[in-house]
Image (tube, rainbow, N blue to C red):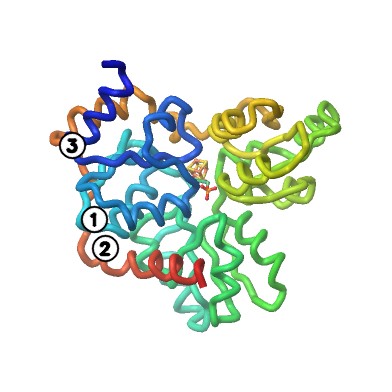
Amino acid sequence: MNRNEQISNLKQEKDTVILAHYYVDGAVQEIADFVGDSYALAKKAAEVTQKNILFAGVSFMGESAKLLNPDKHVYMADHTAGCPMADMVTAEQVKKVRAEHPDAAVVCYVNSTAEVKAESDVCVTSSNAVKVVRNMEQKKIYFIPDSHLAHFVAASMPEKEFIFHNGFCPTHQKIEPKLLQKAKEQHPAAFVLSHPECSPEILELSDYVGSTAEIIRFAEENDAEEYIVATETGVFYQLQKENPQKKFYPVIPMQVCPDMKKITLEKAVYVLEHLDSQPEILLDERIMEQAKRPLEKMLKLALS
Ligand code: 13P
Ligand code: SF4
């Protein structure tokens, strides 16, 4: 029996589904039952029938899976993998702004803690933020925590008034305009595909802006042969796998999320083998009750 067959038998034996984000190592993506962007993973987490979910991603993704499917046991391939952006806003800050602006809807990027989601009206991911915010009845929007995604959304709906928070993704922040200019000079025929967590200056220099899944879809459907890709390098695995004849260049080699890279094949397989003795995601009951509402509202508004 080869290693893949062993892993597949283990998953069956332990009634476990493996969900992975596009930013994790390609070897981990290969053993996953489903690989996706944050939105697709949230939808999938709400649907899976297995008793256990093993998440190859960062903590807010595992928490969202637990919130959307509370009867499941959710385990992380590495439970220390977090998202620094998620920690850039606190529930206390949200309560304060809400008290100052009672007419504002609190729109919370899914890259946030369960405590912050519990104080929010709706969640969004990078692929549905524009649609969900447009569908909100409130004119005033307090968008947390990512300032770049907030500005990207705000630019497409001048009819709404935004209160911005100052969060950002340290990985996407490293992609600076002068570095992108240089990459464009080196690859003049390349299309530039960027994630909306990049700064407005980077988005301005881009040909297409989208979530990880949207970037992958764009590259598949477009005829161009070369692409400069401004997001975490994990996406290159799917990009190259689906388009072996096309060329993909990072802006800089270090557009790497240290937390996503904590997740290795060895750790994922170890957790699967020792599931019963691993810490599972457990959340306070009140937080569970309150934090699942904005996530469910996102799923509803994103489909409407
Ligand atoms: P998407 O999966 O929505 O593209 O978001 C990327 C991200 O930052 C996950 O941490
Ligand atoms: Fe968080 Fe950025 Fe890493 Fe995504 S890439 S998990 S936003 S730090």
Total numbered circles: 3
The residue drawn where x is 70% and y is 32% is: 251
Q: Do the residues labelled 2 and 3 touch (CB within 8 Å)?
A: no
Decide if residue 44 is on the left or right side of residue 249. Answer: left
Give the number of the disc on residue 288: 2
Q: Which residue is at a point 20% across and 47% down the rendered structure image? A: 51
Q: Are marks 1 and 2 in contact (CB under 8 Å)?
A: yes
Q: Mark 1 points at which residue?
A: 283
- Tag 3 residue: 14
In the rendered structure, the answer to whether residue 50 lies left or right of residue 64 reads left
CB under 8 Å between discs 1 and 3:
no
Q: Judge: label 2 CB < 8 Å from ligand 1.
A: no
Residue sticking out furthest to the left: 276
For marks 2 and 3, the one nearer the N-term is: 3
Residue mark closest to the camera, 1 vs 3: 3
Q: What residue type is labelled 1?
A: Leu
